[in-house]
Amino acid sequence: MITEKIGGGTYISLGFPLPLTDDAKNAILEKWDMANDDGEVDDLIAEAEAIARPCAYVLPLSVDELKEDYAVLSGVRFESTLLSKQLSPLMNRETPTVYAYTITCGQELHRWSQSQDDVLLQGVAEDISVRYLYMASAALREFVSDNYFHGKHFSAMNPGSLNTWDITNQKPLFGLLGEGADKCGVELTDSMLMIPFKSGSGVYYESEHNFESCMFCDKLNCPNRRAEFKGNE
């Protein structure tokens, strides 16, 4: 892991070149076995490992104000009843702080996956890109745990994951992430879509009880579900 201070936050690179883990490779080969008759999947994995540069950026933000339907973080207002509710316990602290972040598979893998002519192989390339996104996410969580939370429990919230924190909150979030997001090569479009597509963003915050958006998301068959559905927020 390589870190660099940028704009009040920390840019995190996983190094280069970066091979996939054996478990990730085996999972990809098993999933896409039908596309690997002539070794195409093996070739794609090798191509990805030669160019992948996943990275992340994290930025401390002060919690300035909380009201029922909005929160002000480092002077910027976010419209969300959920965000305000989840951060309310922090107001008992002397300096309530959250940590905005973005993670990505990287522009290199994005351009490479989008350049695949075969639809099936494009699916393989996107799956490989997701694996690199997971690696960046794990590295970021390790960094914030070691440097900010010091073994304490923490949770993450992502704009657009629930109606009570609408995806339009991506705009003020990326306004704060600024040059850190630029360094990662993550762009927010007018429709609030992140490019590269295999990217993520949100805030980490100290929490005694683990929070997952999945707890309140009624998409019960979602393959990315991380927690049991508990009802609507």
Image (cartoon, rainbow, N blue to C red):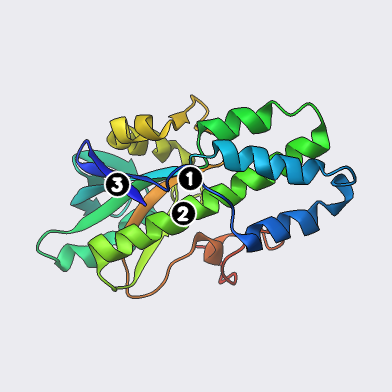
Please tell me which residue lies in front, 41 or 77.
41
Residue 110 picture location, percent across and down: 59, 32
Spatial separation of the CA atoms under disc 2 and disc 1: 9 Å
Of tags 3 and 1, the one toward the viewer is 3
Say above or below: 8 vs 134.
Answer: above
In the rendered image, which quarter is residue 170 located in? top left
Amino acid at pointer 3:
Thr
Q: How dense is the environment of label 1, judged by Cα within 10 Å: few (below 14), some, or many (20 and up)?
A: some
Tell me the residue that label 2 is attached to.
Answer: 137
- In the displayed orientation, state which residue is furthest to the left: 94
The answer to whether the residue labelled 2 contacts the one labelled 1, judged by CB atoms less than 8 Å apart, is yes
Q: Nearer the viewer, residue 101 or 232?
A: 101
Q: Determine which residue is flagged by label 1.
A: 200
The residue at 48%/45% (across/down) is 200
Mark earlier in primary sequence (2, 3): 3
According to the picture, the residue beneath numbered tag 3 turns out to be 3
Closer to the chain start, of discs 3 and 1, is 3
In the image, what residue occupies the spot 64% across and 61% down? 22
Tell me the residue at 31%/59% (across/down): 144
Q: Position of residue 86 (x, y in %)?
A: 34, 62
Q: Position of residue 50 (x, y in %)?
A: 58, 38
What is the quadrant of residue 46 in the picture?
A: top right
Mark 3 → mark 1, Cα distance in angstroms: 19 Å
